[in-house]
Image: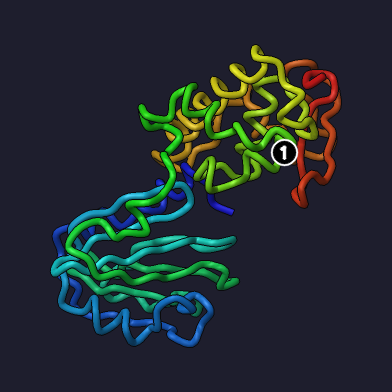
Amino acid sequence: MPELAEVAYYCSLWSPGKGRRIKRVQTHGATRCFRESSGESVENKLRGRTLKDSRTHGKRMLFQFSKGAWLGLHLGMTGKLVIRKPFEELQKHDHLALETSAGWLVFNDPRQFGKVELFQSEDLPDEWANFPLEILSLEFNYKYFEQLLGRRKRAVLKSLLLDQTLFPGVGNWMADEILWKARIRPDRRLESLSTTELKALFDTLKFVCRGAMKYVATDYSDPPKSWLFRHRWKPGGICPKTREDLSRSEIGGRTTCWSPAWQR
């Protein structure tokens, strides 16, 4: 599933459409992607509007249009945004397509786990205004981090990092990377961490999020070979720190990759 930086990358792909009027809207309104807002309502609301701006928060993206219209998109497991040429034929899984002078702004999702939302508001929609702090914001400091975890002492660390109400945008690979860089086993409970380990967890949380935005969000490149990411799913994968075998297990319902020799 696309995570923090992947979502930012896909969101940027619609940037050529900013400042352009939506000439036509085509939808596959019967797909599950329109379970929040009907395809017909999306067509009626966005046709003739101008795309003004876009933003992301965690795994979600939001596009602002003229006259107070907002389009929210969640990519789910297989969703992506693309721009197709003005006369290019739309494809089977192009569930939402906005025609502009720059081409078609397309939301494509083969498995239909993504979601399309429609808002009407002169300001940022209330739902978005009330989202938790973003990890890379200045307000997300160590004091806030401690307060955030105050009532979750029994939580397993891997599952804790995947909680989008706490750490928006952190998904499976990022959670594994954070714990690996902090040298903390993913199956430990929060209450078992020392103060030093807790600070290491906070520092690596910030570091991995910054690195993901640097390497992935710009052009969808992979992180450096020194990261766990480049080794985690290779057959016979080894830890880039210890050169020992990596381990894979299910924690909190998610397949988890970690290094027993490094994360003791």
Residue at image mark 1: 155
Q: Position of residue 147 (x, y in %)?
A: 53, 30
Q: Position of residue 134 (x, y in %)?
A: 42, 39
Q: Position of residue 135 (x, y in %)?
A: 45, 34
65 vs 150: above or below: below
Q: Which of 7 and 66 lies nearest the eye of the viewer?
A: 66
Q: Residue at x 59, y 54 (%)?
A: 1
Q: Residues within 10 Å of mark 1 (few under 14, many from 20)?
A: some
Q: How many marks?
A: 1
Q: Quadrant of the C terminus?
A: top right
204 vs 99: above or below: above
Q: Position of residue 215 (x, y in %)?
A: 47, 33
165 vs 89: above or below: above
Q: Residue at x 24, y 75 (%)?
A: 46
Q: Quick one: which residue is furthest to the front in this view?
A: 151
Q: Quick one: which residue is furthest to the top in this view?
A: 196
Q: Is residue 123 left or right of residue 159?
A: left
Q: Residue at x 65, y 22 (%)?
A: 181
Please indicate, yes or no, whether residue 12 appears anywhere in the rendered image.
no
Q: Is residue 54 left or right of residue 230?
A: left
Q: Is residue 251 left or right of residue 7?
A: right
Q: How is the image coloured?
A: rainbow
Please indicate, yes or no, whether residue 235 appears anywhere in the rendered image.
yes
Q: Residue at x 77, y 24 (%)?
A: 192
Occupied quadrant, residue 234: top right
Occupied quadrant, residue 237: top right
Q: Which of 151 and 180 lies nearest the eye of the viewer?
A: 151
SS at badge 1:
loop
Q: What's the residue type where badge 1 is placed?
A: Ala
